[in-house]
Amino acid sequence: MSGSSYLPLVAILRGVQPHECLSLGHILVDAGYQMIEVPMNSPRPLESIGLLAQEFGQDVLIGAGTVTSVEQVQAIRAVGGRLMVAPNTDAKVIRASKQAGMYTMPGCITPTEALLALETGADALKFFPAGLTPPAVITAIRTILPAGTLVCAVGGIDGSNMAAYMMAGCGGFGLGGSLFQPGISAEAFKRNAETLMNCFISLSQSQESQP
């Protein structure tokens, strides 16, 4: 399965502990998620990524977020991670990620960064933080991007603003605080996961049915 074949909804488990990542992973996979990110500033992130990759890596794109160095890219790939999500546009990190065969989603906020990321090999663009790139900004930037570019909004995304970003041209999202926060109960996490997934699927189907 190629990166473009995965449902573009990234579950961000910032702050997850290794001992809980598999139970949360099962909830996500059961809810339909196909991309799971453990940010590098989480406790023992490589351990969690390795566990998730071993359990779900054949069917789900597992990897890291907040990736800021070539060394981190290499460490993530070494434990089985195949997803690289960065908060910024760093050509060295993007190239290293692509050379390692990883699905690469760097962060950008300006047309210059967006075009540089694509030129360097990015598979998708992460507009982050979404609060600084409201729908009107993404609509404008999309006009200068190559057709078919996957644009994802990340940072403060929930069921209340997903529709506006989709109308602006976002094909995917990164879900952080609206999905997971350290200490959340399994029941609350499952509810969040299902609610956000249902919202995304409903909006996607509605958009596809429009002439």
Image (cartoon, grey):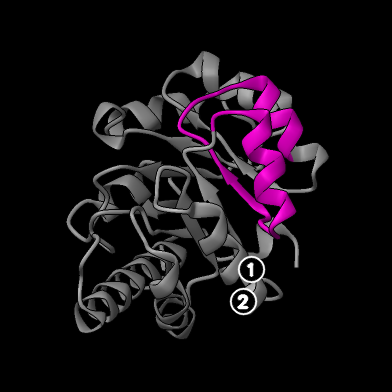
For label 2, count other residues whose C-alpha is less than 10 Å away and answer few (under 14), some (14-19) or many (20+).
some
Task: Confirm or deny contact between disc 1 and disc 2 (CB under 8 A).
Answer: yes
173 and 76: which is toward the camera? 76
**Residue 193 screen position, x and y as percent:** 32, 73
Q: Which residue is mark 2?
A: 56
Quadrant in the picture for the N terminus: bottom right
Mark 1–mark 2 Cα distance, whole angstroms, equals 5 Å
Q: Residue furthest top?
A: 112
**Residue 174 screen position, x and y as percent:** 40, 51
Q: Residue at x 46, y 58 (%)?
A: 10
Disc 2 element: helix
Disc 1 element: helix
Q: Is residue 86 magenta?
A: yes
Q: Which residue is mark 1?
A: 53
**Picture quarter containing residue 159?**
bottom left
Q: How many numbered marks, from 0 up?
A: 2
> Is residue 189 toward the left or the right of residue 18 in the image?
left
Q: Residue at x 47, y 77 (%)?
A: 22
Residue type indicated by callout 2? Phe
Q: Residue at x 33, y 54 (%)?
A: 15
**Residue 3 screen position, x and y as percent:** 69, 57
97 and 152: which is toward the camera? 97
Residue type indicated by callout 1? Ala
Above or below, 68 relative to 126: above
Above or below, 10 relative to 195: above
Question: Which residue range is magenta in the image?
Answer: 68-97
Q: Is residue 73 magenta?
A: yes
**Picture quarter containing residue 201?**
bottom left
